[in-house]
Amino acid sequence: MKTQIVKNWVILGVLAVIFAIIISNDAWWEAGLRFFFPDLRQVVYQRLSLLTMVGQHLNLVFISSSITMIIGVPLGVLLTRPSMKDFLHVSNNLISIGQTIPPVAVLALAVPAFGFGMIPTVIALFLYGLLPVVRNTIAGIKGVPSHILDASYGMGMSPVQALFKIEIPLSARVIIAGMRISVIINVGTAMIGAVIGAGGLGVPVMAGLVQNNLAYILQGVVPAALLALLIDQVFNHAEKMLVYSEKNL
């Protein structure tokens, strides 16, 4: 099992390198898209390289997802404490609002306060990705069997010790699954950042929509899809490592 996990990480690393090589060669994209769209005058977005746009996209996803996890996991843990029982339902409803409001609407509200660029985009992505992290954290911790907690208290553990030594380790897989959903959502939703000058892979997509250029749209959509698949596999392998660790405790 351990050997298979190592092999999976090696394969994933090779795929990541291949992805980096592919997005670094605009000439390959030019040739490939020209083959499918010979009648278009331009098939590759010229103002920014694909590598630059992927870097901007990753930056938006990394910052927003990091903030989401830093805030979402502790908030989910806090809402499972007995003292917060009365606030759990209300808090869940408030957090759900982040996904019911379209990210574009959040941008429209945030731009007047923060201007154009990265900050309003990160705010929109943070709000949109918060729900899965908080919900899964709550579900994971509440899913810890009560008899295990009772046994830990019987051994003399305090509630804080039981949280860090029992509840969080046993719910880690569910929490990571929430992070996985949140990050993948952000990879797709980060496209909207191009609307307000935050860059990313939404730039050629927006240009393609304006100019009726399908090649531009594919130049943004295909790398975003591949990026989402790679990130999804990173979290998938992380979950498998946790399963392996649990079996060997």
Image (cartoon, rainbow, N blue to C red):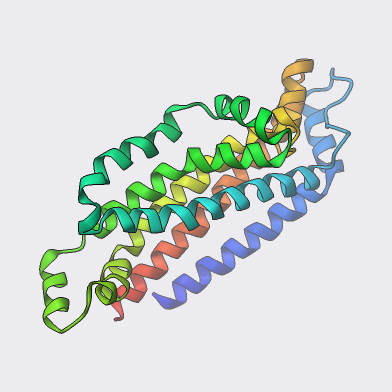
Image quarter of the N terminus: bottom left
* Residue 80 in view (yes/no): yes
In this view of the protein, which residue sits in the foreground, 80 or 240? 80
Q: Please report the residue visible at 59 percent of the width from the left and 27 percent of the height from the top.
A: 109
In this view of the protein, which residue sits in the foreground, 129 or 74? 74
Q: Is residue 56 left or right of residue 47?
A: left
Residue 77, x across and y down, in percent: 33, 58
Residue 87, x across and y down, in percent: 26, 45
Residue 224, x across and y down, in percent: 64, 40
In this view of the protein, which residue sits in the foreground, 4 or 151? 151
Q: Is residue 166 left or right of residue 187?
A: left
Q: Please report the residue visible at 79 percent of the width from the left and 42 percent of the height from the top.
A: 50
Q: Please report the residue visible at 80 percent of the width from the left and 38 percent of the height from the top.
A: 29
Image quarter of the C terminus: bottom left
Quadrant for residue 219, please give it: top right
Quadrant for residue 125, please give it: top right
- Residue 241, above or below 204: below
Q: Is residue 181 left or right of residue 225?
A: left
Quadrant for residue 221, please give it: top right
Q: Please report the residue visible at 79 percent of the width from the left and 23 percent of the height from the top.
A: 37
- Residue 56, above or below 30: below
* Residue 176 in view (yes/no): no
Q: How many marks?
A: 0
